[in-house]
Amino acid sequence: MKILLTNDDGIEAEGLKHLVNWAKRKGEVCVFAPKVQQSGKSHSIEIHGAYEVKKVDIFDGVEAYSVDSTPCDCVRIATLGMKKKFDLVISGINCGFNLGTDIQYSGTVGACFEAAKGNINALAVSACFTSFNNAIKNLDRVYAEIEKRRMFDFTKIINVNFPEAGDEILITRIGKPIYTDDFEFLPDGTVMPKLVCLYNGSRNLEVDTDATMTGHISVTPLSPDSTDFAAYDMLTKKVG
């Protein structure tokens, strides 16, 4: 199996190093990751200028490239630019959860949406801010569950979040946002965003936010098709 690894924390991020060590046991690994931190870049790409793509010797025995652009562009340059073929794209291990509707901002998940656009199965992997230990400990179990249940037969994108502790795997749907921002308007005319947590401590284990925040591993199938099918069906329904 040929595996492309990327992330949004940067090519020198700790989580990517852990992911490389894990993925090397699963197949032939290649890394295309951002040169610098790219969190919150979602599915953005660079279309107005050139950017650096540099081969680097960071991971023992693994072909790797530093890309001075977004996670999405990392997937694009690997597949469209260099014409490399992959069976699976894995993005992570992200430092911090990607949960609820906040995944719309995620560069980690954005890379997976780009992979799915190219008809490649994609796995987004995220862990809590404080430790990667539980993700490292349970990643084999989660991947085995994905294979056992043939999840990629039903979806192109799977979003996995590992809590700091806890090993029960739950299939979940997207929950409400966990974060918002307050904005401090500074005297020099700039604005400083300040993260505010919205999570209210609910325990609906059907949704990724509650499942993960209460110590469960959440596995959420995602769709690249944003069509509101209920609205589409109503608006295209023949009248009379």
Image: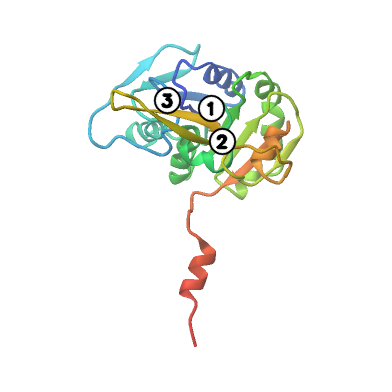
Residue type at tag 1: Gly
Residue under numbered circle 3: 32
Which residue: 36% across, 17% down? 55
- Give 79 or 185, whichever is nearer the viewer: 185
Q: Is residue 146 visible?
A: no
Q: Position of residue 154 (x, y in %)?
A: 61, 50
Res 131 label: none
Of circles 3 and 1, the one toward us is: 1
Where is residue 239 shown, x and y percent of the image? 48, 84
Q: Which residue is mark 2?
A: 123
Decide if residue 124 is in sight here: yes
- Density class for disc 1 (Cα within 10 Å; few <14, some 14-19, many ≥20) is many
Left/right of residue 104 with respect to residue 162 in the rendered view: left
Task: Give the quarter of the image for residue 15.
Answer: top right
**Element carrying mark 3:** strand
Whether the residues at callouts 2 and 1 have beta carbons within 8 Å, the answer is yes
| Residue occupying the far bottom of the picture | 240
Where residue 86 sits in the image (x, y, percent)?
A: 48, 34
Name the kind of residue labelled 2 in the image.
Leu
Q: Quadrant of the N terminus?
A: top right
Q: Earlier in the sequence, mark 2 or mark 1?
A: 1
223 w.r.t. 21: above or below: below
Question: What type is the residue that disc 3 sits on?
Answer: Phe
Residue 92: numbered disc? 1
Q: Residue at horizontal 45%, vertical 12%?
A: 58
Task: Compute the Cα span from label 2 to label 3.
Answer: 15 Å
